[in-house]
């Protein structure tokens, strides 16, 4: 079995390029992606656990006097 190494470099995206991709419809409207350190990552769907954690965190922050949006 012959194994060869493939050398490649990942291209990083800029915020401007990422927004342009959104503008021209590269991503499906319901597709959840984020630009993190130049990489476009598909993120998981918000589920019940996420909603619950977000709600609890918001409640705690409000009790501490920190306004949340």
Image: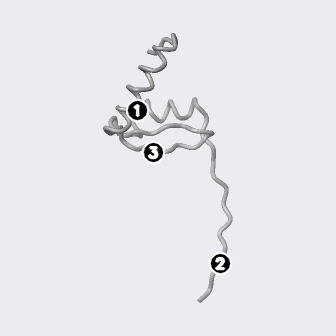
Q: Residues within 10 Å of mark 3 (few under 14, many from 20)?
A: few
Figure quadrant of the N terminus: bottom right
Q: Residues within 10 Å of mark 2 (few under 14, many from 20)?
A: few
Upstream in sequence: badge 3 or badge 1: 3
The residue positioned 68% from the left and 65% from the top of the image is 7
* Nearest-to-viewer mark from 3 and 1: 1
* Residue 5 figure quarter: bottom right
Q: Which residue is mark 3?
A: 42
Q: Position of residue 33 (x, y in %)?
A: 45, 39
* Nearest-to-viewer mark from 1 and 2: 1
Marks 2,3: beta carbons within 8 A = no
Secondary structure under badge 2? loop
Q: Which residue is mark 1?
A: 53
Q: Position of residue 55 (x, y in %)?
A: 38, 25
Secondary structure under badge 3? strand
The one of 56 and 45 positioned closer to us in this rendering:
56
Q: CA distance from mark 1 to mark 2?
A: 46 Å
Q: CA distance from mark 3 to mark 1?
A: 20 Å
Upstream in sequence: badge 1 or badge 2: 2
The residue positioned 57% from the left and 43% from the top of the image is 39
The one of 69 and 62 positioned closer to us in this rendering:
62
Upstream in sequence: badge 2 or badge 3: 2
Above or below, 61 against 26 in this view is: above
On residue 28, which mark appears?
A: none
* Nearest-to-viewer mark from 2 and 3: 3
Please say which color scheme the image uses. Answer: one colour
The residue positioned 61% from the left and 40% from the top of the image is 38
Above or below, 5 against 25 in this view is: below
On residue 4, which mark appears?
A: 2
Q: Residues within 10 Å of mark 1 (few under 14, many from 20)?
A: few
The one of 44 and 62 positioned closer to us in this rendering:
62
């Amino acid at each position: 079995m012959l194994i060869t190494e493939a050398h490649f470099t990942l291209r990083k995206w800029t915020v401007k390029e990422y927004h342009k991709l959104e503008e021209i419809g590269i991503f499906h409207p319901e597709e959840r992606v984020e630009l993190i350190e130049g990489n476009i990552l598909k993120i998981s769907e918000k589920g019940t656990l996420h909603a619950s954690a977000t709600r609890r965190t918001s409640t705690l922050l409000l009790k501490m006097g920190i306004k949340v949006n």
